[in-house]
Amino acid sequence: MSHLVVITAGMGSPSSSRLLGDRLADATLTALGAAGQQAPEVRVLELRDLAVELATYYTSHVPSTKLQEAFDLVGTASGVIAVSPVLNAGVNGLFKLFFDLLDEGVLKGRPVVLAATGGTARHSLAIDQAMLPLFFYLKATVAPTAVFAATEDWGSAEAGLVRRIEQAGAELAELVTTRPATDYADEFANVPDFASLLGN
């Protein structure tokens, strides 16, 4: 069964980054339903739960079973919603580390919506300056609308945020439908290993 993955690097509980990711997933499912598409399962990766595994893999180069399952979840996703809090004008360390450690090619052609949270609107530049270059490098298919949610966007001023979420969800739904990604494992299933190329 196809699935969407929400990847959130929020550190709090509850987390505004997780809340934004959930809202984007709901908007995507709504748009898919309106287009007559079957709703995929939504899976959530909270990177704070993988902090130890990420640090261990970074130093040992051996992923734990839990971390490998998370990587595989991304590599088979029909779409990805990636949300980070903004710290020091960029994404937080867990977010960057997770995507640094993904195998090259996992996100190639995979539809992605980028989103971030921060205290004030001036932090929204982190999406263009930190997140977009990263996901372009990873060759993801990035939805045109990114969503930034400042503290003031929640509550009485939420109407503008809701419109952005709905737009981004509609764009991700369209990409999932019209530009489906290849499962990472399937893409490399028929590639011969190096030894066979040498005749060994």
Image (spheres, rainbow, N blue to C red):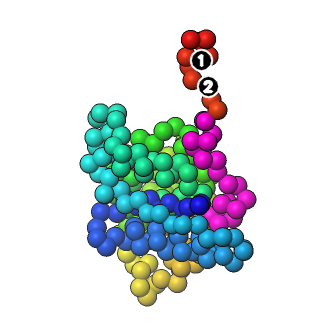
Residue sitting at x 50%, y 60%: 5
- Image point 48% across, 48% down: which residue? 72
Classify 10 Å Cα crowding around label 1: few (below 14), some (14-19), many (20 and above): few
Q: Quadrant of the C terminus?
A: top right
Q: Helix or strand or loop: what does disc 1 sit on?
A: helix
**181 in magenta:** yes
In the orientation shown, which residue stands out farthest toward the front? 200
In the picture, the disc for residue 192 is: 2
Residues shaded magenta: 170-189
**Mark 2 nearby-residue class (10 Å; few <14, some 14–19, many ≥20):** few
- Where residue 26 sits, quadrant-wise, is bottom right
Q: Quadrant of residue 164?
A: bottom right
Residue at (56% x, 61% y) in the render = 3
Against 81, residue 135 (above or below) is above
* Res. 83 in view: no
**Tag 2: amino acid:** Pro
On screen, residue 187 above or below 35: above
Residue 34 placement, left or right of 54: right
Q: Is residue 42 left or right of residue 13?
A: right
Quadrant position of the N terminus in the picture? bottom right
Q: In terms of depth relative to the viewer, which is nearer, 153 or 27?
A: 27
Q: Where does residue 92 sit, x and y in percent of width and height?
A: 35, 54
Residue at point 69%, 78% (across, down)? 34
Q: Amino acid at mark 1?
A: Ser
Query: Is residue 186 depicted above or below 167 in this figure?
Result: above
- Under circle 2, the secondary element is loop
Image x and y of residue 172, in percent: 62, 64
**Gap in angstroms between the C-alphas marked 2 and 1:** 6 Å
Give percent across and percent down for residue 15. Answer: 34, 70
Q: Main secondary structure of the magenta part?
A: helix
Q: Which mark is residue 196?
A: 1
Residue 186 highlighted magenta (yes or no): yes
